[in-house]
Image (cartoon, grey):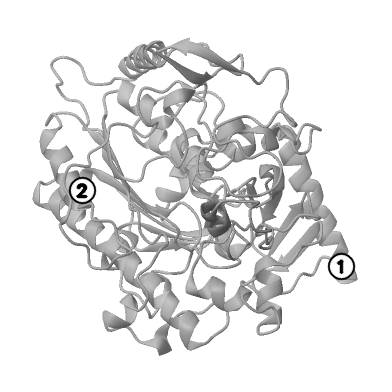
Amino acid sequence: MHKEKLSNKKHHLTPIIMRYTIFLLGFVLFSCQGGPTSTNTQQKKRPNILFAISDDQSYPYTSIYGDQSIQTPAFDRIAQMGVLFNNAFCAAPQCSPSRAAILTGKNIWQLEEAGTHSSYFPNKFTVFTDVLEASGYELGYTGKPWGPGNWKDAGWDRNPVGPAYEDVSYEEAPSTGISKKNYAANFKAFFEKKPADRPFFFWFGCHEPHRVFEEGSGLKAGKSLEKANVPSFLPNDELVQSDLLDYAFEIEWFDQHLGEMLALLEAAGELENTIVVITADNGMAFPYAKANLQEYGTHVPLAIAGPSIEGGRKVDDLVSLIDLAPTFLEWTNTTPFQGITGKSLMNILMAKTEGIVDESRKMVLTGRERHTHARPDNLGYPARAIRTADYLYIQNFKPDRWPAGDPAVPLAEGQASAEDLKSMQGGYHDIDNSPSKSHITADSTAFPNYFQLAVGKRPTEELFDIKKDPGCTQNLAKEESLKAIKETLKSELMTQLAMQGDPRVLGDGDIFESYPRFASMRAFAGFRERGAYNPKYGKEALEVVKVKD
């Protein structure tokens, strides 16, 4: 039997050889640093790591951040035990690129196929989970790991996060939008199975609050429309309020399972020796949030607690989730691998001050490429952004394209199957289907300002005053009084992108358009072959070869 696997003329190590190489390197390096010996005498116990990541949750949707529509006691507890970050950002406003960035400590433009949604994750890239495992950590995950995308045919022998623990499920979930996976019970199964003398890294990838929500589930749970936290880019009416309450209800499900995991660790006497990190992969699945570089697409919650941290601190430093990989490695006394772009957070975590702790953290960078199949020829919407304490500057590389995907294109009878026609309904497919999306996009005259923000074409440059306009509703890029600020931000962004080898600024940006998509394809014109490279944009170095199973 043969399978198509990614070659790229770079993926030359088999998964077994690569993992064995990492294991030997990690073992040697860890031993040299005074890692556990066979007698394990007088060795400092290495901390466990519980990494909890929700699916599509924006800042500030937790109770400790001040949101009155939601109760998140587990998140709040970790924030009080450790550090609450007010300015944490994901690398991309989409799940699989963001998760790949977390695992590698790199930005999405450094990750080839893994920098776009639902493509390959090339196994040439080292992930911190493998390095931790090589140094003695037991790995496991439940829920959503890296994905969606194809890791098997890219050369991995398992998901880059580690082994799955998915056996325990509920017969019924509290709403139709919630997964039946019993995350806490699966964590318990992992914890009871792992060797007692081994530290662990466990990835709790909650499927919530990803769409679809059960409409009215928030109201059924007793939530109040008046307390719905409606951002400025959405209509503040009952339909949107109710949709946001459904979203809040699913965040609470994530928090409930996290609380059960913390209780298990506490009962086992392991909580004090466990690093707990709670965040989200990207922003909420509402128009002008997820899949956008605006604030609610990339600004995410983050709380971290663990051994030696002085708790109860709130910090305003600008941090990225690509900073987690070097943080985990430094905290566990594991030698970092080469090529990490992120910067360890240990100096912030071990400080005793609040506010701005590390004055050198002046900015974070974010970016996006293709999200869903939302345009002819399977094209994406490439953009990059720089966020400082005061401003967000965005460069849109293809302003002629619709940022949320093309409007629905009616096809003549007989030109497409019924299934294809259904896949095209509504248009703007980079926005998850929802009551709020339909509410705003069904009639452009009903909410003209909200409609334009959500789906309208955008200029090459956007500039937002974040402190005055966190919803990013007023583009100030043409303001003469801000011209110097805009040019400074643009220059810094382009300098950093060039230093990091971004093809979009080095003349080879179309390489991103060639990358395969493994999720569903729609009835747009042009290239639409699932799982294949688009030859119109491919390079000679990109090839798919046959290899024996």
- Three-letter residue code for mark 1: Lys
Q: Residue 32, located in which quarter of the rendered image?
A: top left
What residue sits 43% from the left and 39% below the top?
Answer: 327
Neighbour class for label 1 at 10 Å: few (<14), some, many (≥20)? few
What residue sits 53% from the left and 55% below the top?
Answer: 418
| Marks 2 and 1, how far apart at CA | 52 Å
Location of mark 1 (residue): 478
Residue 448 visible (yes or no): yes
Asked which secondary structure carries label 1, the reply is loop
Q: Earlier in the sequence, mark 2 or mark 1?
A: 2
Residue 1: % across, % down? 39, 13
Residue 258: % across, % down? 25, 56
- Three-letter residue code for mark 2: Glu
The number of numbered badges drawn on the structure is 2
Quadrant of image for the C terminus:
top left
Picture disc at residue 100: none
What residue sits 61% from the left and 19% below the top?
Answer: 8
Q: Is residue 471 above or below residue 462?
A: below
- Foreground label between 2 and 1: 1
Location of mark 2 (residue): 272
Q: Is residue 528 above or below residue 250?
A: above
Neighbour class for label 2 at 10 Å: few (<14), some, many (≥20)? some
Q: Residue 224, located in which quarter of the rendered image?
A: bottom left
Left or right, 52 with respect to 315, comes to left
Q: 470 or 164: nearer the eye?
A: 164
